[in-house]
Amino acid sequence: MTATNSPTGGATPQAAAGVPVKKTSLARVAAASSIGTTIEWYDFFIYGTAAALVFPTLFFPEQSAASATLSSFATFAVAFFARPVGAAVFGHFGDRIGRKRTLVWTLMIMGVATVFIGLLPGYETGAFGAFENGIGIVAPTLLVLCRFFQGFAVGGEWAGATLLTAEYAPEGKRGLMAMWPQLGVAFAFFLSSGTFLIFALVAGNNAGPDSAFMQYGWRIPFLLSAVLVLIGLWIRVSVEETPVFKQDRELASKDTAPATLPFADAIRFQWKEILIAGGALTSLFSLFYMGTSFLTNYATATLGHSRPFVLGMGMVAALVFGLAIALSAMYSDRIGRKKVIGTSVGLAIVWSLVVFPILDTGSTGAFALGLLVTLIIFGIAYGPAGALLPELFQARYRYTGAGLGYNLAGILGGALPPLAAAAMVAAGNTLGVGIMLSLLSAMSMMCVLAMTESSKNTVTGELAENDAVLATEVP
């Protein structure tokens, strides 16, 4: 069952809750979703940057350069398989106890896992002088475990942050409001690239295993995460639960039907929406993680560009694709989510085939062009995605359904392509990487064409009443 269409779009927060909302509420919601998501993704991205620049040497020193890179990105991929688990677990609690309390837990888990990574001894070299001879195979094992918890937390974070904004959004402004958690990704990429750039310059640009950067400089961005998490927790605790969730719980409390699991209901009633959303956003993920993590390694290890240049370009690219996210999200309120996302996917089909021939010319200008265009195309689709997924699902399992669709796309587009690309590049087959990305985008285009326009769906008022009716249909 799909969400109910409304000719007027989403209701105002006041109408949804039946009580007045303070004028500052929307500003607080935007800040909480954006800042919290920035912190979560900052933690996620510094891992991707370290996986490209540090972990092959630190945790897999006995392997060849190509094998070590492949192993490093395999640990990066672990999080994508943990994300659906996090989406199911946190989705359950988000749909039962509330968006706000669940988001506090996702932030705490991510922060603890990230700080632990910063303290891990290496395979042969310890952390901060401890374990001087390293801890051998235990080191990459602990790295994988921490990475799993990072993915577990992010799996529950995104859906909750977008629901927080979408369920507060005034009429006709859901794309604008849902833009704020999406922008957190751009902020995070800027911060992670900038932090690594600063410490790479301070600690030295020597890429050898005995350099200051490899010994301790890379750890500082991970440890700084603790400060950011405390700030994020303070902001999130100050935000009220969404009026839509309060209304839905009030209706559920009056319902005499047996309680059901949000996960089971999402699969039972809206499995098509989960699959279509996951497929449609696969292109988005494949471009993004190739651009933010894989190309960082490819530019330094294969193309020979300096680490400061690559990280500096990452900061510039973050600003550009943040602008693309904002413009596309706002524009989707006018012409619809489907058209905007379809435009991105169409561009991706073509761009994927030419990006590596451009990069392989070896010039710094070519790398800048390749990175910027890749992330602009990503931003065009990512902006509307924050409003799209909440609009597709019923209120009583919206957190679960949106999380499952989003993280399915993460596996298809974010986990597998970087692994396959690393193997192809090691074999000298960069053309194969472009073909793979283009085929993924073609698959996404088919899902976009099968998708119904969601911008006029309501996420408040009538939808909550429909949920109460739907609950009586569940045996």
Image (cartoon, helix red, strand yellow):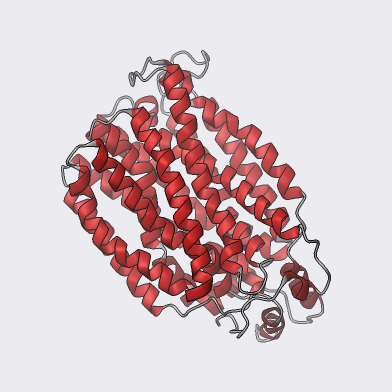
Residue depicted at 51% across the width and 37% down the height: 191
Instruction: Give how far across and how far down residue 414 sits, in percent.
Output: 39, 53
Please tell me whether residue 434 is drawn above or below residue 392 in the rendered image.
above
**In the image, residue 426 above or below residue 127:** below
Residue 472: quarter of image: bottom right
Q: Can residue 86 be seen in this view?
A: no
Q: In which quarter of the image is the C terminus?
A: bottom right
Rendered location of residue 95, percent (x, y): 68, 65
Residue 169 relative to residue 364: left or right: right
- Judging depth in this view, the residue of 363 and 164 nearest the camera is 363
Total labels: the figure holds 0
For residue 31, side relative to residue 439 (left or right):
right
Residue 227 in view in this figure:
yes
Quadrant that contains the N terminus: bottom right
x then y, percent, for residue 59: 39, 28
Relative depth, front residue between 453 and 90: 453
Q: In which quarter of the image is residue 124?
A: top left
Q: Give the x, y percent position of residue 284.
A: 39, 59
Residue in the image at 37% along x and 77% along y? 449
Q: Is residue 168 left or right of residue 374?
A: right
Name the residue rendered at 39%, 25% in the picture: 58
Q: Foreground: 21 or 435? A: 21
Up the image or down, 132 lies above or below 113; here it is above
